Image: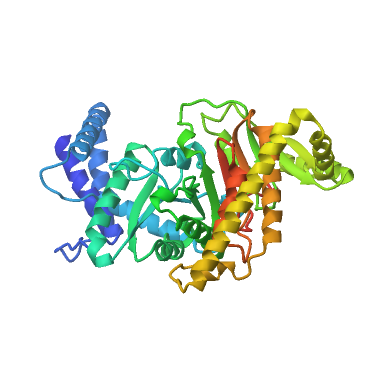
Amino acid sequence: MFFLLCYAGVNLSCFLLDLLDAPSWRPRWKWHHFLLSGFGALLCFVIMLIISWVFTIISVILAALIYYYVSVRGKAGDWGDGFKSAYFQLALRSIRTMGAKQVHPKNWYPIPLIYCKPWGILPADVPCHPMLPDFANCMKKKGRGLSIFVSIMEGDYGDCIEEAREATRTLTAYIEYKKCEAVGDVIVARTMEDGFRTLIQSMGIGNLKPNMVCMRYPEIWRDERRQLGNIPNQFVNIIRDCHVGGKAVVIVKGIDDWPGEYQKQYGFIDLYWIIRDGGLMLLLAMLLKSKKSFEACKIRVFCTAQEEGDAEQLKADVKKFLYDLRMEAEVIVLNYRAMDEEQAAAAISEEHAAERQTSADAVRQARKRIAARAAAHKAEVQAGDSRRPMDGEYKNYDEEKTSQFLHTTMKLNSIILKYSRAAAAVVLVSLPPPPPKHPSYNYMEYMDLLVDQVPKLLMVRGYKRDVVTIYS
C-alpha cells in the first residue's frame, strides 16, 4: 500500500507540474505527457482499492497525517509543493475572469485598505493599533475577505528599505497573531502624501484593488507639545486623494474602545443618512450586525426633512427601500423646522440652559482658535516665511462661511448626542467632504465639533457607486 501511494504521489506531482506549466518542471524524457502521469496515479489508486479498500483508507489517512506533520514542523530539504503551483494558477485564472470592469452591486465585496498611521502613542513592538484588526474583521461577513494593512515610512528608499522590510515582517506577524485575514506592507516615500498617492494608484490588481480606505480619527491633532501641526494637511489630503482615486473612506473615532470579537454590545447601530453614498453605510451596518459583538443591536436610520409633509413621504420611501433590500431597520425622520422650533422653545427654558451654553461656548472657542490661526499665518506670510506647504489656504478665507459650517456641524452633533449618546453602541454618519477654499485647520475644527462626546463613531463617505441593489 505504501509503495503504491509513493508511486501515486510521484505521478500526481508530475501531472500537476506539467499541467500547470511550472517553470521549474523540465523532464528529460522527451515523450512525457501529463495524461500519462495522471493515468499512472489513477492506476495506483485503483490497484490499492482492488487489494483492500479498508487498508486503502487507512493508508491514505496515515499519509495525510504525515503530510500535515511535515508541512507544520518543517522538513530537512526544501522540495517545494505542487499544490502551491495549483493555487497560483487558480488565482491567475480568477483574476483574469474577474477582469477590471465595474463590479455589480450583487458581487461587491469590501476590500479595505487599513492605514496604520498611529496618530497616537503605541508601544515600540506594536506596528498598528491593537483594535484595527478587530475593526477590519467587522467589515467582512463571517470574517471572510481581504484586508490590506499599510504603513508609510518617510525617508530615502535606499537608506530605509531594509528597515521597511523588517517592519513589513513585523506587521504581517502581528496581523496573523490577531487572526485577521489580511496582508501587510510598509512602503518608503519622501513624504507621507506622496506615499499615500502611490498606494491609491498602484495597490492591488484588477478588481482586487482596495475599494475603501479606513483609518482612525486623529484625536491628538491639536497637541502642540508633540509638534503635530502637519496632521490637518495630511488628514484632509488623504480624504481628497481618496475622492480623486475613487475610493470610499471610513474614519473611526473611538478605536481605543472598539469591542473585540466576544465583547457583547447592546443598544442600537444608528445611521445618520445625510447624503446618498451608494448604500455603503447601510451595508456596513449590516456587516456590523452580522458579527457576534453587535448581533444583539438593532439598526436605526435617521433621515432629515425640511417640511412635515416631506417627512412622511421620506419615511415611506426609505422604509420601502429598506424592505426591498431585505434589511430590517427602524426609520426615524428628523424635521429641521420642528427641531428649530423645539430649540427656540428650549432657549427660554432653564432646563436646557447649561447644554445650550456648552454648545455656544464650543462654537465660540472654535471660531476664536480659527481666527487666531489665520492671523498667525498671515503674519508669517507677511514676514516672508513661505515654508508652510499650504500657504494659499488663507487667501480666500471667509469668516462668514466658516461660522456657518461651525453652526451646522454643531447642530448635527447635538442631534447625535440627543438620540444616540446613551442608546447607541456605534454611530455611523456621512463624512462631510472638505469644503473648497477652506483651510485644513478649519476642517479639523469642524470635525472636532462633529465627533465631540460621541464614544464610537464611524464617518463614512461613499464613492458614487452602488454597493447594494434592490434587484434580486
Residue found 21% across the figure and 45% down from its top: 9
Farthest-out residue, right: 309
Quadrant of image for the N terminus? top left
- Is residue 55 toward the left or the right of residue 275 in the image? left
Instruction: Please provide percent x and percent y for residue 74.
Output: 17, 40
In the figure, residue 373 lies in which quadrant?
bottom right
Instruction: Please provide percent x and percent y for residue 127.
Output: 33, 45
289 and 307: which is toward the camera: 307
Residue found 60% across the figure and 59% down from its top: 434
- Is residue 176 toward the left or the right of residue 23 in the image? right
In the figure, residue 449 lies in which quadrant?
top right
Q: Is residue 305 visible?
A: yes
Instruction: Please provide percent x and percent y for residue 331.
Output: 75, 37
443 and 6: which is toward the camera: 443
Q: Is residue 299 visible?
A: no
Q: Is residue 389 above or below residue 267?
A: below
194 and 466: which is toward the camera: 194
In the figure, residue 323 lies in which quadrant?
top right
Q: Is residue 411 above or below residue 241?
A: above
Residue found 42% across the figure and 41% down from its top: 133
Instruction: Please provide percent x and percent y for residue 464.
Output: 64, 58
Residue found 55% across the figure and 71% down from its top: 392
- Is residue 354 toward the left or the right of residue 112 in the image? right
Q: Is residue 470 above or below residue 355?
A: below
